[in-house]
Image (cartoon, rainbow, N blue to C red):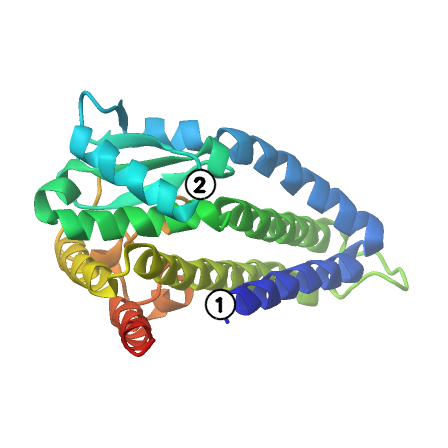
Amino acid sequence: MESIKTIVLLTLMTLLMVWVGGIFGGVDGMLIALLIAAVMNFFSYFYSDKLVLAQYNAVEVDEHSAPGLIEIVHRLANKAGIPMPKVYIVPEPIPNAFATGRNPSHAAVAVTEGLLDLLDEDEIEAVLAHELSHVRHYDILIGTIAATIAGAIAWIANIMQFGAFFGGGREEENTPNPIIMILLSIILPIAAGIIQMAVSRSREFMADEGAARITGHPEWLQSALIKLDNYNAQGLLPEATPETAHMFIVNPFTGKDISFASLFRTHPTTEQRIERLEEIKREMMYR
């Protein structure tokens, strides 16, 4: 179901981009904006893992420096049927975790020191299974596609706004009304952002289910999510940015969330995630 939702949302973003390009610059305008966004995201796609790990001061560990953590990741990677990713620890007391890398062969998982201190071994295993599920499902690629399309829409919107201010005086038959152009330049990036966040939320549900099936214990992840959500509601990961919030197992801005921001929430609520996991637990019990 979540896979279908993701495809539908990405299709909506594509159609939105095509429609915007058709309004302002036809096919040529759309292609130019898409090309610019694609170039921007190309660098992000191939180098985002290094940038993000450096941003959070992540330190790579191995079987000598963190044998227990490496053993868990190795076991889970075998269960998930993916290559062993690189493993990092982020020297921060706020508990959280994320995965990065463009595909399973170029992947890394990172956990904060706070997560290792807060959770027990079963809960840590569930969190790591969630992150490896992201890796297995190519969620970084999905996120990059969504970002590319949203970026293209944003570029077109900027061009529309520029054209409305400086080209509004021309009376050409095919020139859009400048007021409409300004309104669209404001509304369309917001709409694209909402759809992009919906894609992110959909992938979180899939990763939760993947973790439950890899470990065979949905209750481990339920327990971990409750602890992580409660703790993150009280503190903010210092280096956290809106651009990387979707990568974490729980939103690092949980403590600053407000009702309007729910439209742009990168994660489902913890209550929704626990409810989905409860359904999976019942399904597994009756098999």
Residue under circle 2? Answer: 82
Locate residue 278: give its quadrant: bottom left
Residue at screen point 60% across, 63% down: 7
Q: Is residue 24 above or below residue 28?
A: below
Please name whichever residue, 51 or 253, is drawn nearer the observer in this view of the structure: 51
| C-alpha gap between disc 1 and disc 2 | 21 Å
Q: Residue 234 location, x and y as percent? A: 12, 54
Please name whichever residue, 115 or 76, is drawn nearer the observer in this view of the structure: 76
- Crowd around label 2: few <14 · some 14–19 · many ≥20 (10 Å): some
Q: Is residue 174 above or below residue 1?
A: above
Residue 174 seen in render: yes
Residue at screen point 80% across, 54% down: 25
Give residue 205's mark. Answer: none
Q: Is residue 284 left or right of residue 238?
A: right
Residue placed furthest toward the front: 287
Q: Is residue 224 above or below residue 64?
A: below
Q: Amino acid at mark 1?
A: Glu
Dot 1 or dot 2: first in sequence order is 1
Please name whichever residue, 9 or 87, is drawn nearer the observer in this view of the structure: 87
Q: Quadrant of the C terminus?
A: bottom left
Q: Is residue 211 left or right of residue 107?
A: left
Q: Tag 2, which secondary structure?
A: loop
Residue under circle 1? Answer: 2
Residue 247 seen in render: no
Q: Tag 1, which secondary structure?
A: helix
Residue at screen point 21% across, 64% down: 222
Q: Residue 121 location, x and y as percent? A: 14, 47
Q: Residue 202 location, x and y as percent? A: 45, 64
Q: Is residue 244 above or below residue 281?
A: above
Q: Is residue 24 left or right of residue 103?
A: right
- Crowd around label 1: few <14 · some 14–19 · many ≥20 (10 Å): some
Q: Amino acid at mark 2?
A: Ile
